[in-house]
């Protein structure tokens, strides 16, 4: 029996891309159906993440004329990870396999064939789409992105190098994903934790056709911080290690200041001021900031607020 495939595509202000993306993905579905790799009940599911432009109206219009297109609209903007989670959980009700990708078509849709082959022929329940190069990125983005994955590894966070959110997952994987209830989502770190047999498909990422990137530097930094603090306590341990180092250094400095005072080579008050600065101020604010980040996450998690609210679901119509 052929499997039902859902391609889940989060959208935020993508009115310039929706029609182009739909055209390309529809061709891909029809090709896969013709090759008998997937069921003719397969669909493209758009997730409108509180777009402020005409994105959702275009999705509803396309839904009326294209049998492969469906979608849900969130009540407000909840961020890429929450929008993606909503699409994965809703689509698993009707899908056997789910592929997530962005609406900008930078992910190579032809890699979908290889993903499905690995699922069908090798029983892989998670197939990660991994970039084989970053020649379309600016020098700054390429360096920061590569160092991000390396830094995450140092921090003890298990991720797939150069993998974003272009992946295939089975229905069973998404059923287990629902058990992960954290509010601060970092899906790239959660899927390796779920386990099951996995594989990698390499592809070349393309340049964006239209519109602007929805991940400026500010969002990228916040995303990286979420990933680190959601999966690792190493920053807190580093604070401890740094605190010990500063304390030892302060003892040495205090001894030096005491010797200087006894030999008379110092002005009044200098010993106390220098010793206090080294002992307290050097590490205090940084430590408070790191610990505060963890406390903030604990605060968010304990409230158990919904990660998304669905305003409209075309699957129910």
Image (tube, rainbow, N blue to C red):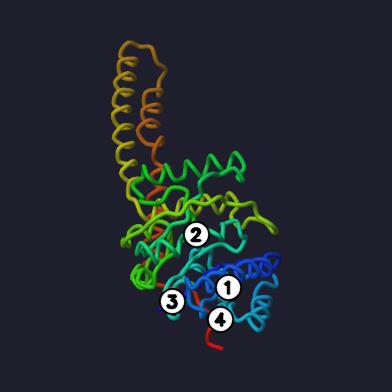
Residue positioned 50% across, 62% down in the render? 113
Q: Is residue 35 left or right of residue 296?
A: right
Q: Which residue is mark 1?
A: 30
Proximity of marks 4 and 2: CB atoms separated by less than 8 Å: no
Q: What residue did someone put label 4 on?
A: 311
Q: Quadrant of the N terminus?
A: bottom left
* Image location (x, y in percent) of residue 206: 61, 52
**In whole angstroms, how far apart are the C-alphas of marks 4 and 3?**
32 Å
Q: Residues within 10 Å of mark 2 (few under 14, many from 20)?
A: many
Q: The residue tagged with tag 4: helix, strand or loop?
A: strand
Q: Secondary structure at mark 2?
A: strand
Q: Residues within 10 Å of mark 3 (few under 14, many from 20)?
A: few
Upstream in sequence: badge 3 or badge 1:
3
Distance of label 2 from label 1 (alpha carbons) = 20 Å
Q: Is residue 111 above or below residue 259?
A: below
Residue 151: image quadrant is top left
Of circles 2 and 1, which is in front? 1
* Disc 3, SS: loop
Which label sits on residue 2?
3
**Which label's residue is closer to the chain start, 1 or 4?**
1
In front of the other: 237 or 20: 20
Instruction: Tell me the element at label 1.
Output: helix
- 294 or 78, which lies in front? 78
User: What residue sits right under mark 2 in the picture?
Assistant: 166
């Amino acid at each position: 029996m052929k499997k039902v495939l859902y391609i889940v595509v989060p959208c935020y202000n993508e009115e310039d891309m929706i029609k182009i993306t739909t055209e390309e993905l529809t061709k891909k579905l029809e090709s896969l159906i013709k090759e008998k790799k997937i069921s003719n009940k397969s669909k493209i599911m758009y997730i409108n993440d509180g777009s402020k432009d005409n994105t959702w109206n275009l999705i509803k219009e396309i839904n009326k004329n294209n049998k492969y297109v469906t979608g849900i609209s969130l009540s407000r903007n909840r961020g890429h990870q929450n929008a993606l989670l909503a699409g994965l959980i809703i689509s698993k009700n009707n899908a056997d396999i789910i592929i997530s990708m962005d609406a900008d078509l930078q992910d190579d849709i032809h890699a979908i064939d290889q993903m499905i082959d690995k699922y069908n022929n090798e029983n892989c329940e998670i197939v990660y789409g991994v970039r084989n190069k970053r020649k379309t990125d600016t020098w700054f983005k390429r360096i920061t992105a590569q160092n991000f994955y390396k830094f995450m590894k140092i921090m003890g966070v298990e991720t797939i190098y150069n993998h974003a959110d272009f992946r295939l997952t089975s229905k069973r994987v998404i059923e287990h994903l629902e058990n992960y209830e954290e509010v601060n989502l970092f899906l790239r770190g959660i899927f390796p934790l779920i386990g099951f047999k996995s594989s990698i498909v390499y592809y070349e990422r393309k340049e964006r056709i239209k519109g602007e990137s929805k991940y400026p530097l500010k969002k990228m930094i916040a995303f990286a911080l979420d990933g680190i603090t959601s999966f690792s306590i190493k920053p807190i341990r580093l604070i401890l290690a740094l605190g010990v180092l500063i304390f030892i250094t302060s003892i040495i400095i205090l001894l030096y200041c005491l010797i200087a005072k006894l030999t008379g080579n110092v002005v009044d008050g200098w010993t106390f001021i220098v010793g206090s600065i080294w002992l307290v101020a050097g590490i205090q604010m940084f430590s408070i900031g790191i610990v505060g980040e963890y406390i903030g996450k604990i605060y968010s998690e304990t409230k158990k607020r919904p990660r998304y609210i669905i305003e409209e679901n075309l699957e129910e119509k």
